[in-house]
Image (cartoon, rainbow, N blue to C red):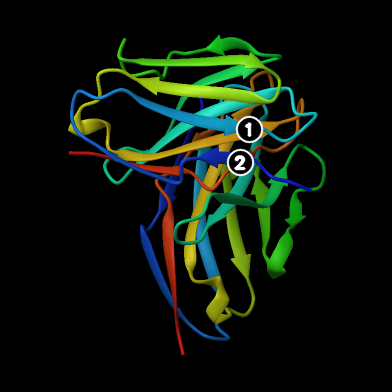
Amino acid sequence: DAGVIQSPRHEVTEMGQEVTLRCKPISGHDYLFWYRQTMMRGLELLIYFNNNVPIDDSGMPEDRFSAKMPNASFSTLKIQPSEPRDSAVYFCASSAARQPQHFGDGTRLSIL
Amino acid sequence: AQSVTQLGSHVSVSEGALVLLRCNYSSSVPPYLFWYVQYPNQGLQLLLKYTSAATLVKGINGFEAEFKKSETSFHLTKPSAHMSDAAEYFCAVSESNDYKLSFGAGTTVTVRA
């Protein structure tokens, strides 16, 4: 039973570059969440989708961040242009309705 | 809006001793409460959940938590710590009419041999 799959696991890039993080949710889950984890701010919900539609993006830090879910098995979180303060671990999670969220192993992003 | 406070960012216990991690929540509606564990370089794994059924909830790896509405608490316990329990633990709350999880700041547990 495959869990939530995120890629890449690690990303190191220079300031100003575009970064794309990818997530494959668990099959059958109709909710998908993107989180950011930092030492200073802990775990923050950035955005979540239901049936591929964004429901709440109030946690997205600024216009440089965007997220899409073109189909039930794939989502992306894009940062353009990236800045050093975007360095963090980004998690994707998925769930069925009213069920606990299952997390991927995260993408560790470093912006130099 | 919901929020979670975890008391103590670090807890150190001896192997075989009681593990007690404290969590207090605020919520304007009946809450769903969760404990997750995070091992280094991994995602969060669900330990247990409270969803308005029994107030004492048993989870995986010998952990349990008790929901106390009067104290707005959901403390996590394990009677006897094992070296493999060393990890970071997060308490989270979701309001019953929402799907958003709010996490506490986390508590890092170290286990001494």
Judge from the rendering whether residue A45 lies leftward or rightward of residue B62; answer left or right. left
Q: Which label sits on residue A5? A: 2
Judge from the rendering whether residue B4 lies leftward or rightward of residue A81; answer left or right. right
Q: Can residue A69 be seen here? A: yes
Calculate the distance from the C-alpha at mark 1 to the C-alpha at mark 2: 5 Å
Front residue of this view, candidates B59 and B28: B59
Image position, residue A11 (x, y; %): 35, 41
Judge from the rendering whether residue A109 lies leftward or rightward of residue B39; answer left or right. left
Image position, residue B68 (x, y; %): 65, 47
Asked if labels 2 and 1 touch by Cβ distance under 8 angstroms, the answer is yes
Q: Image height check: is B110 above or below B37?
A: below
Q: Which image quarter: residue A103? A: top right
Q: Which label sits on residue A62? A: none
Q: Image height check: is B65 above or below A48?
A: below
* Residue under disc 1 on the same chain as residue under disc 2: yes
In the rendered image, the quadrant that contains the C terminus of chain A is top left
Q: Image height check: is A24 above or below A74?
A: below
Front residue of this view, candidates B26 and A48: A48
Image position, residue B56 (x, y; %): 75, 54
Say which element carries label 1: strand
The residue lying at 25 percent from left, 19 percent from top is A81
Judge from the rendering whether residue B13 lies leftward or rightward of residue B76; answer left or right. left
**Chain letter of the residue carrying label 1:** A
Q: Mark 1 points at which residue?
A: A24
Using a 10 Å C-alpha cutoff, classify the residue at mark 1 as few (fewer than 14 neighbours), some (14 to 19) or many (20 or more): many
Q: Can residue B1 be seen here? A: no
Say which element carries label 2: strand
Q: Which image quarter: residue A94? A: top right
Question: Mark 2: which amino acid?
Answer: Ile
**Chain letter of the residue carrying label 2:** A
Using a 10 Å C-alpha cutoff, classify the residue at mark 2 as few (fewer than 14 neighbours), some (14 to 19) or many (20 or more): many
